[in-house]
Image (tube, helix red, strand yellow):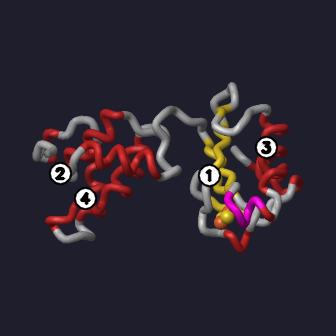
Amino acid sequence: MAAVMNPSDNNVLSTESLAEIDKWVAKYPAEQKQSAVMAALRIAQEANGGYLTTELMDAVADYLDMPRVSVYEVATFYSMYELSPVGQHKICVCTNISCMLCGSDEVVAHFKKRLGIGLGETTADGRITLKEVECLGACVGAPMLQIDKQYFEHLTPETIDKILDNLD
Ligand code: FES
């Protein structure tokens, strides 16, 4: 059983992060505040430069009064959470069935060629991480990918080149 903490005891999550998490907690009945775990992990991850540490996951668990292992289960199940440092931009290429049938192999191959890295790797300058993900729910736009918080659909080598050229 996780220890019940007073919010002021939590010195791992910033005051700003806790205020954001509180907004999500307020959306659920008081006895179900663990329902905010996905939002809380996202907020903690964004505040930490794009990845979660064990310390952050533990802080989220304690703040939401839930077992730490339950938070680890969420953080390791969903591909949007990172457990190690990533690049400034994260390119998530969907290779699930619809995207695969519509050419995700070519999309991945083009990124590998342009960036000089493989899936799960980050460019030497720390700018871009290339990641393979499962269905992102935009099958109608296959093949597609997500960069940071934006979706790009109906990809071709030409559109990929434009996307990369426009990335800051
Ligand atoms: S299979 Fe790629 S978005 Fe659904």
Query: On the image, numbered disc 2 is attached to which residue?
Result: 65
Give the foreground label among 3 and 1. Answer: 1
Q: Circles 2 and 1: CB distance less than 8 Å? A: no
Question: Depth check: 16 or 121 in front?
Answer: 121
Secondary structure under the numbered disc 2 in the rendered image: loop
Q: How far across and down, in percent of the image, does residue 24 sit?
A: 30, 63
Q: Is residue 159 left or right of residue 34?
A: right
Q: How far across and down, in percent of the image, does residue 63 sit?
A: 20, 48
Query: On the image, numbered disc 3 is attached to which residue?
Result: 111
Cα distance in 3D space between marks 2 and 1:
30 Å
| The residue stretch that appears in magenta | 96-100
Q: Circles 4 and 2: CB distance less than 8 Å? A: yes
Q: Residue at x 72, y 66 (%)?
A: 98
Question: Depth check: 65 or 25 in front?
Answer: 65
Label disc, if present, on residue 31 of the rendered structure: none
Q: Amino acid at mark 4?
A: Gln
Cα distance in 3D space between marks 3 and 1:
14 Å
- Indicate whether residue 97 is drawn in magenta: yes
Q: Residue at x 69, y 44 (%)?
A: 168
In primary-sequence order, the first of circles 4 and 3 is 4
Query: On the image, numbered disc 4 is attached to which residue?
Result: 34
Q: Residue at x 82, y 58 (%)?
A: 103
Circle count: 4
Cα distance in 3D space between marks 4 and 3:
38 Å
In primary-sequence order, the first of circles 4 and 2 is 4
Label disc, if present, on residue 133 of the rendered structure: 1
Q: Amino acid at mark 1?
A: Val
Q: Badge 4: how crowded within 10 Å, few (<14), some, or many (20+)?
A: many
Asked which quadrant contains residue 8, the reply is: top left
Q: Badge 1: how crowded within 10 Å, few (<14), some, or many (20+)?
A: some
Mark 3 Cβ inside 8 Å of ligand 1: no
